[in-house]
Amino acid sequence: MVDKSAEPKSCDVLIAGGSFVGLAAALALSRSSRGTLGVTVVDRTPPGVARAAANDGRASALSAASVNLFRSLGVWDEVQADAQPFTEIDITDSPADAIARPSLLHFDGALGDGEPAAYMLENHILRGALLSCVEAADGISFLAPDVVEGFSVEANGVVARTQSAGAMQARLLLAADGRRSALRKQAGIRSIGWSYPQSGIVATLGIEKPHGGRAVQHFLPPGPFAILPLQGDRVSLVWTDARRRADEIVALDDEAFLHEAKKRMGGLYGALSVAGPRAAFPLDLHLAREFVADRLALVGDAAHGVHPLAGQGLNIGLRDVAALAEVVIEAARLGLDIGSGPVLERYQRWRRFDSAFSGLAMDALNRLFSNDITPLRSVRSLGLGLVDRAPVLKRFFVREAAGLTGSLPRLLKGQEI
Ligand SMILES: Cc1cc2nc3c(=O)[nH]c(=O)nc-3n(C[C@H](O)[C@H](O)[C@H](O)COP(=O)(O)OP(=O)(O)OC[C@H]3O[C@@H](n4cnc5c(N)ncnc54)[C@H](O)[C@@H]3O)c2cc1C
């Protein structure tokens, strides 16, 4: 267990869940308040496990806006060398056995100023860097492995029960405890959403021929098949398939798995090899009906979960972090109670509609593309062909993917709060 302060019984903000979103929130609050807000993070995963590649074989597409946040938090310097910029993005829906796979839509991976719209970074590297920054920060206590078991709201704050560290008092409790958030349930907040009949298979492969930074989203009838570039001659696959089929594919031996992957990837990458663990993640869409309750705010997957086809789930969670930090820091500077209703309401107004819109947009894309219905194929080919010929629209979509549209919190613009 890492516990830099012997008895962190009282703090300003208690964060349940110290994965990507919880750790980023701790850094954003502590740094932006210049250490005046005391933050405690509790996570059930031992840090050694959280840092291990075997624990999470996924890689995340991080938008330019998320990169701005990580720059402000001092995390980007730790990971930049491992991050692979996207140089171009191609979208196709050709059959897997087609000899030629014309691109329906092609994007440059760079924004107008030449900066990449997004980078690929392995999850275990990002989580390790966030952990190191949190462990080095003076104003943050990090308790792991430990579990927040429940909480009660009192007049001026909240008291949370933890498994090992006992009762902890805070003015504000953040639930960053992931998609099955127990805190969300305890607060009586219901979610709307549905399960997809699909799982996302994730695997890292070594490739013989360089990818050149090109990302491919190949829409196949069972679901999207993404080939995402990683540093070195490696790619990360996010391969959506029917749930049972996905479990069967993950259980194949390496040779048979590579054979199935090759059928879908074609010959562009040369010989393939296994370069990391593989796993299948059952997919769902969920959106909390409320993002806040008395003294409680939901952030990240605790508040929303979206289909991974556009690699946006974590980016949306980091938007929560930046918005929440801005609202809380401004309230603290005005001498307001950071856990009070009006402060949390401002956070909810900022984030709830945007999260719902993103989740439903991913859902619509998945429904439009995960089928082989001829009239739908024609409509989507026509639509994508039109976008491909409209440079202004394409620039808009690249800025959207970069997370640079809408009402942006300052940290996502690379500014201080
Ligand atoms: C196949 C797949 C591919 C994806 N690809 C991308 C991508 O390319 N780009 C992108 O932006 N997003 C992507 N996502 C989404 C992204 O992975 C999630 O949005 C992100 O992991 C959410 O982070 P989080 O910190 O909110 O939750 P989690 O990562 O789920 O972390 C929750 C943490 O809370 C802890 N915890 C839970 N309960 C308690 C408790 N009671 N007390 C203490 N600790 C607790 C857990 O130990 C865990 O560490 C993908 C998702 C999938 C499934």
Image: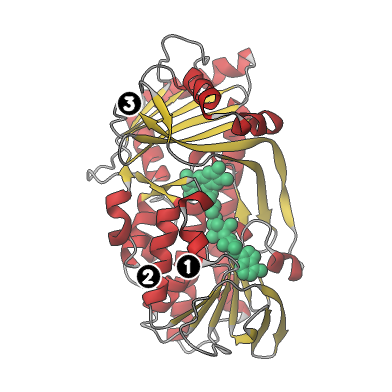
Which residue is rendered at x = 57% and y = 53% of the image? 355
| Badge 1 residue CB within 8 Å of ligand 1 | yes
How far across and how far down the image is residue 278, in percent? Answer: 54, 39
The quarter in which the C terminus is drawn is: bottom left
Which one is earlier in the sequence, the residue at label 1 or at label 2? 1
Please tell me in which quadrant of the rendered image residue 130 appears: bottom left
Residue at the image point whose x is 40% and y is 35% from the top: 235
Label 3 – label 2 distance at C-alpha = 35 Å
The secondary element bearing badge 2 is classed as helix
Residue drawn at point x = 30 percent, y = 25 percent: 209
Determine whether the residue tagged by mark 3 lies in a helix, strand or loop: loop
Which tag, 1 or 3, sits closer to the chain's start?
Answer: 1
Q: Which mark is residue 208?
A: 3
> Decide: marks 1, 2 in contact (CB < 8 A)?
yes
Name the quadrant where ligand 1 sits.
bottom right
The local secondary structure at tag 1 comes to helix
Q: List the residue tagged with mark 1.
A: 23
Q: Which residue is mark 2?
A: 133
Callout 3 amino acid: Glu
Q: Name the residue type under label 1.
A: Leu
* Left or right of residue 326, residue 303 in this image: right
Residue 131 against residue 225 in the figure, above or below: below
